[in-house]
Image: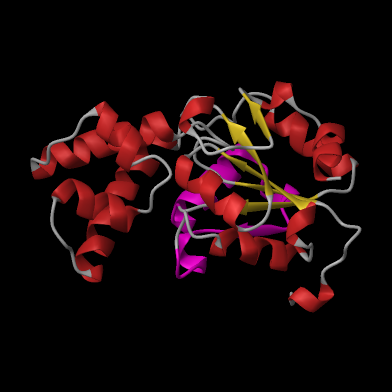
Amino acid sequence: MSSETTSSNKYAVIFDMDGVIADTNPFHAKAFESFFDKYQVAYTQEAFEQHMYGKHNSYIMQHFFGKPLSPQEIAKLEQEKEGMFREIYKTVATPVFGLVDFLNDLKKHDFLLGVATSAPQANMDLVLDALGIRNLFQSTLSSEDVKLHKPHPEVYLKSAEALGVPVQNAMVFEDSFSGVTAGNSAGMKVTGVLTSHKKEELPPCAAYIRDYRDINAATVKSLLK
C-alpha cells in the first residue's frame, strides 16, 4: 500500500515479537547456549543481554564467533540455531500476560495491528500460529522483508505503509534498545515492554509496561493524540 493512500484518521499498533508478543528470549538463550557449546564459542549472560536480545542473526553470529562471516555461512548457522529454537519453543509457546485481551481491546477500538520482527519468518509463523493470533494482524513483517535491520527503522516504516497509516498515528511496542531506537527513528511513539530490560536500559519511550495489564486501547489513543 503506497504512502499516498495513508489515512490520517486511522491508528495502528505495531508489535515487535520476541519479548513483546511472547517472552521467547529465555528460550533463544537456551538455543544459543546449545549452539555455541557445539561450536565451542564463549558466551555470558551479560553478553547475551548486550549482543543478542533485539539483534539480527548476522550481527549476533559475527560478534560471538569473533570474525567476519560470509552471507552463506551466516545463513547456514542461522538456519541451524533457529531450528533449535523452534524445537525448544513449539510446545511451550505462551503470550506475554494480558496480550490477547489487549489485542481484542485494540480491535474493538478500530486499531490496525502489525507485527515487525527481526526474527525469521519461520519463527514468526510458529509464534503467531501457536498462540492463535495471526488473524488479528493486518500486516506481518519478518527479517526477510527488509534490507536494513533494527536499529534502522525500515521495518516500522514498511509496516506503517502496509497498514496505510501515517507514522505519527502508529504506536510501537518494543523491549530492546535497538528496537526502541528503530521505532523512535521511524517517528513513532514507543511503549517499552520491560520483559528483557529495565526502563533505564532503554532509550526514552512514551510509556513503559511490565505486561499488558498496564495499558489499554484508550491509553494508546490518548498517547497518540
| Residue 195 in view (yes/no) | no
Quarter that holds the N terminus: bottom right
Magenta highlight range: 119-148
Residue 204 sits in quarter: top right
Q: Is residue 140 magenta?
A: yes
Residue 62 shown left or right of residue 156 in the figure: left
Residue 213 in picture, x, y percent from top left:
72, 21
Residue 141 drawn at (x, y percent): 57, 60
Residue in front for this viewpoint, 177 or 45: 177
Looking at the image, residue 36 sits to the left or right of residue 80; the answer is left
Q: Would residue 55 be counted in the magenta stretch?
A: no
Q: Residue at x 38, y 29 (%)?
A: 26
Left or right placement of residue 66 versus residue 89 in this view: left
Q: In the displayed structure, would residue 11 be above or below residue 155?
A: above
Q: Quadrant of the C terminus?
A: top right
Asked whether residue 103 appears in the rendered view, the answer is yes
**Image colouring:** secondary structure
Q: Is residue 145 above or below residue 136?
A: below
- Rendered image quadrant of residue 4: bottom right
Residue at image point 51% right, 58% down = 142
- Locate residue 166, reporting x and y percent: 78, 63
Left or right: residue 214 compared with residue 67: right
